[in-house]
Image: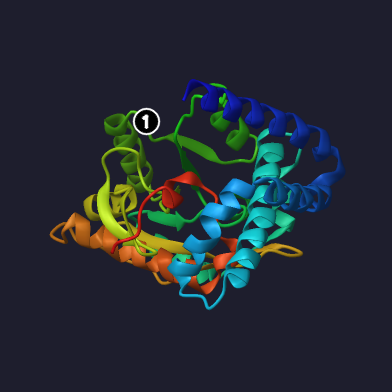
Amino acid sequence: MKLQRLRRRSMFHALRWLAGRLASGGMETLRQRGERLGRWHHRLAWRQRRQLVPQIQRALGLDSREQAGRILAEAFAVNDRAVLEILAMYSGAVAAEEVSRVCEVASLDTLDQALEHGRGVVLLGLHMGNGVAMATALAQRGYPVHVVFRESGKISPGFFEQGLGSLGITAVNAKPPGPGLRRMLTVLKRNGVLFILMDQGMKAGGVEATLLGKRLNMPPGPAELARRSGAAVIPALMQGASPRWRFKLDTAQFFERDVPLDAAVENLTQIMQKQIEKQPQWWTWHQRRWARHPFID
């Protein structure tokens, strides 16, 4: 385990260095090099391919492994590009204005109408493309965007706060859980927008829900925040990757206090599953927290 952590930490710092070097070429250079990096990553990750291709085929009910293989290859290219871009953005070497130009966000009226209620918005994201670019584009339009993050042992302290701050976004630390929840509720009380990712199972805790044929402990945060604050939950759905990132804000979801937490979590999980099933080539299948779980028999 220690060797794996060391390897992941080393890879992170190597990517961070590379992203900083490539940032001078702008977002187009990062797009091209990131996709190329993803294609090489896919070729070299033969163990992951052997594990994931049959799982993707089963999860999506595909006729052939070839279809699943093509989906996985595209997922590597799109999401490794996103990682490289985000690291470059956090380095401060890419201006927020440039990031905003390579990201389109449709259905902003959904966000405007939700903010009129004065109880804030939970913007629900997935590990699909560059969601931080979307948050940056919204911040550039004047929306009070806050991005929720969790500290990681492989990342230097202050990395998220400094990087997001350089893009005009406030970072909100989700840890420790109690103070983190209070910080997020404060943002919503002030009618802010919280961008949260929810599509990875938790190592500990969470609420059981079904995602793509597997029972996972899903993060309860977005549902719990909505139940406590009355905030709207708006799924941010990816619609395109090239030449620009394109996102669309989906129908707002509301959860009263008397709605059971597990029902609210299942509701949001199914919204995310439908998006993954619609655009499976853009989801990060090679993140570890879905693949390691068994299918429901």
Quarter assignment of residue 113 = bottom left
Q: Is residue 186 visible?
A: yes
Q: Secondary structure at mark 1?
A: loop
Residue 25: percent from the left, percent from the top?
Answer: 86, 43
Quarter assignment of residue 190 = top left
Between 253 and 169, the one lying in front of the other is 253
Residue 226: percent from the left, percent from the top?
Answer: 28, 55
Indicate whether 156 appears above or below 32: above
Q: Quadrant of the C terminus?
A: bottom left
Quarter assignment of residue 177 = top left
Residue lying farthest to the right in this orientation: 25
Left or right: residue 48 versus residue 216 is right
- The residue wearing badge 1 is 175
The crowd level at tag 1 (other Cα within 10 Å; few <14, some 14-19, many 20+) is some
Residue 178: percent from the left, percent from the top?
Answer: 27, 32
Identify which residue is drawn at 67% across, 61% down. 74
Q: Amino acid at mark 1?
A: Lys
Residue 221: percent from the left, percent from the top?
Answer: 32, 47
Between 44 and 122, the one lying in front of the other is 44
Identify which residue is drawn at 65% across, 54% down. 76
Q: Is residue 285 visible?
A: no
Between 261 and 203, the one lying in front of the other is 203
